[in-house]
Image (spheres, coloured by chain):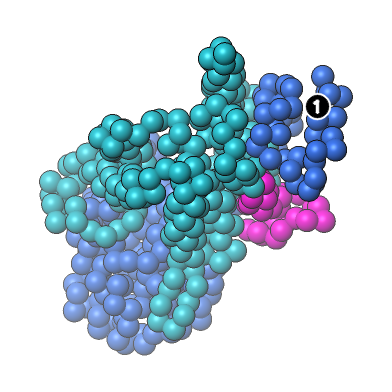
Chain colours: A cyan, B blue
């Protein structure tokens, strides 16, 4: 665990650095994939750039909207560089809206675009696992196993490493055979969603932190991931069925 | 169906072997996705049955969700101030040094928040990392900036070590139950952010 790396007077926040690296590598994988799929790389790059920008702005606006009373007293703080002043849901809504508007304007088809973005999302999943490994977040329950790690005064399941291994495996599956168009459009994206949800359910079984407990011990995060998995599997089935029906 | 799936996975076309785990191969395996769904459901049920999640707030660690480690330190007049004295209050614990520019920059914001919320049960403890600072410089700085909240002096690094301080400033937000609810590494923090964090904790029932 290394949340901060001190180089002389500089204190570098490693999770932030991993996130930046994840975005950069993810973007390069998206561009690589777009080239293989013969899609317009500059349009895809523009989509990623504008949605990320909108995400940051939306997250800040969401934060301000939720705490408007405080910002009326201190309007100058709206422009503060604090990365803590961001609201996740506001960011996601802004990203989706911007992606939708940009896609409409550029005439992008939804499913093929999502497929091209999928390798980047798979890299981001790995980056999130790396961030957790660095910060210690999402740590495991105490367990004395040969591969346990000593964290927060106990031997624990290395859940962040489980996440990283599964993330790597998912990425390899997702990036395989970029030229292959035998599967219906959207299959790559939906497979990522299904596999990532299943991986989350599996690793959450060993996680001590970020776990909400209800329904006699069942974790709420697992139930949310299971709902996502069900939707993804059903959509995969529907898209396969409609492809078969469309075949002559 | 299971046998058929394994046969598909292990058939002779799987060369090189990693091809077996390719995307198209997964979709060729009959029942892979329904199987994945059932397997996930099984894991959820088993997790619920064994329920190994632990409650963090019982043990003291400098992390979100854990109880804040208790300590006592001298203030500027050599009186011993203990974190335990502020049980039931919302506590902001700020580690700082007089030579650290972001620490200096954020001090007025802490003072503003202290003035604004001190009657609501908010306390700010400014822990000077004196082992790597000069006590007199720190004292002088606090006077110059009109700091009115308690400034404590960590001469022997004991509390900074206890809180695993790796960068300055580092700020902990502790709720009325003594549980750490947020940690912010680096700064300078602004008044709006501090107020949002404090007001979130003040809204909670004691």
Query: Toward the viewer: A208 or A222?
Result: A222
| Residue at x 36% of width, y 73% of height | B96
Local secondary structure at mark 1: helix
Q: Is residue A65 left or right of residue A136?
A: left
| Residue at x 47% of width, y 49% of height | A35
Q: Position of residue B50 (x, y in %)?
A: 74, 32
Does residue A225 appear in the picture of this structure? no
Q: Is residue A103 left or right of residue A242?
A: left
Query: Toward the viewer: B148 or A28?
Result: A28
Q: How many marks?
A: 1
Q: Position of residue A123 (x, y in %)?
A: 53, 50
Q: Position of residue A73 (x, y in %)?
A: 13, 49
Residue A32 vs B185, above or below: the answer is: above
Q: Quadrant of the N terminus of chain A?
A: bottom right
Does residue A49 appear in the picture of this structure? yes
Query: Toward the viewer: B39 or A79?
Result: B39
Q: Outermost residue toward the front?
A: A248
Q: Which residue is mark 1?
A: B5
The crowd level at tag 1 (other Cα within 10 Å; few <14, some 14-19, many 20+) is some
| Residue at x 74% of width, y 43% of height | B19
Q: Position of residue A152 (x, y in %)?
A: 63, 58
Q: Quadrant of residue B107?
A: bottom left
| Residue at x 22% of width, y 53% of height | B192
Query: Which chain's residue wears label 1?
Result: B
Residue B174 vs A89, above or below: the answer is: below
**Bounds of the magenta segment:** A142-170
Q: Quadrant of the C terminus of chain A?
A: top right
In the image, is residue B56 part of the stretch drawn in magenta? no
In the image, is residue A155 part of the stretch drawn in magenta? yes
Q: Is residue B175 left or right of residue A150?
A: left
């Amino acid at each position: 665990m290394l949340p901060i790396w001190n180089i002389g007077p500089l204190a570098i926040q490693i999770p932030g650095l991993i996130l930046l690296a994840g975005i950069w590598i993810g973007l390069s994988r998206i561009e690589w994939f777009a080239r293989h799929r013969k899609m317009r790389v500059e349009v895809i790059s523009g989509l990623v750039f504008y949605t990320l920008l909108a995400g940051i702005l939306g997250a800040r606006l969401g934060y301000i909207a939720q705490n408007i009373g405080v910002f009326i007293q201190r309007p100058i703080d709206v422009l503060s560089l604090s990365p803590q002043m961001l609201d996740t849901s506001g960011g996601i809504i802004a990203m989706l809206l911007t992606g939708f508007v940009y896609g409409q304007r550029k005439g992008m088809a939804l499913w093929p675009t999502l497929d091209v973005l999928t390798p980047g999302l798979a890299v981001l999943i790995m980056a999130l696992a790396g961030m957790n490994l660095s910060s210690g977040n999402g740590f495991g329950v105490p367990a004395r196993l040969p591969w346990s790690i000593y964290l927060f005064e106990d031997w624990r399941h290395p859940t962040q490493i489980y996440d990283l291994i599964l993330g790597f495996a998912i990425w390899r599956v997702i990036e395989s055979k970029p030229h292959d168009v035998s599967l219906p459009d959207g299959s790559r994206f939906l497979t990522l969603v299904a596999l990532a949800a299943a991986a989350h359910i599996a690793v959450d079984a060993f996680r001590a932190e970020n776990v909400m407990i209800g329904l006699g011990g069942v974790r709420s995060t697992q139930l949310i991931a299971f709902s996502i998995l069900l939707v993804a599997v059903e959509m995969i089935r529907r898209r396969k069925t409609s492809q078969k029906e469309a075949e002559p | 169906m299971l046998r058929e799936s394994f046969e598909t996975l292990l058939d002779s076309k799987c060369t090189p072997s990693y091809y077996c785990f390719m995307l198209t191969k997964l979709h060729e395996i009959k029942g892979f996705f329904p199987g994945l769904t059932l397997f996930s459901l099984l894991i959820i049920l088993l997790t619920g049955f064994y329920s190994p999640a632990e409650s963090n707030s019982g043990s003291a660690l400098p992390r979100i969700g854990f109880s804040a480690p208790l300590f006592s330190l001298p203030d500027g007049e050599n009186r011993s101030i203990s974190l335990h004295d502020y049980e039931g209050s919302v506590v902001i614990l700020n580690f700082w040094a007089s030579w650290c520019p972001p620490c200096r920059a954020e001090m007025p914001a802490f003072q503003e928040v202290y003035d604004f919320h001190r009657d609501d049960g908010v306390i700010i403890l400014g822990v000077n990392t004196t082992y790597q600072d000069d006590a007199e410089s720190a004292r002088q700085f606090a006077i110059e900036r009109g700091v009115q909240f308690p400034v404590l002096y960590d001469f022997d690094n004991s509390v900074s070590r206890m809180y695993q301080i790796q960068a300055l400033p580092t700020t902990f937000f502790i709720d009325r139950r003594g549980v750490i609810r947020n940690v912010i590494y680096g700064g300078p923090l602004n008044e709006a952010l501090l107020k949002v964090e404090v007001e979130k904790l003040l809204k909670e029932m004691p």
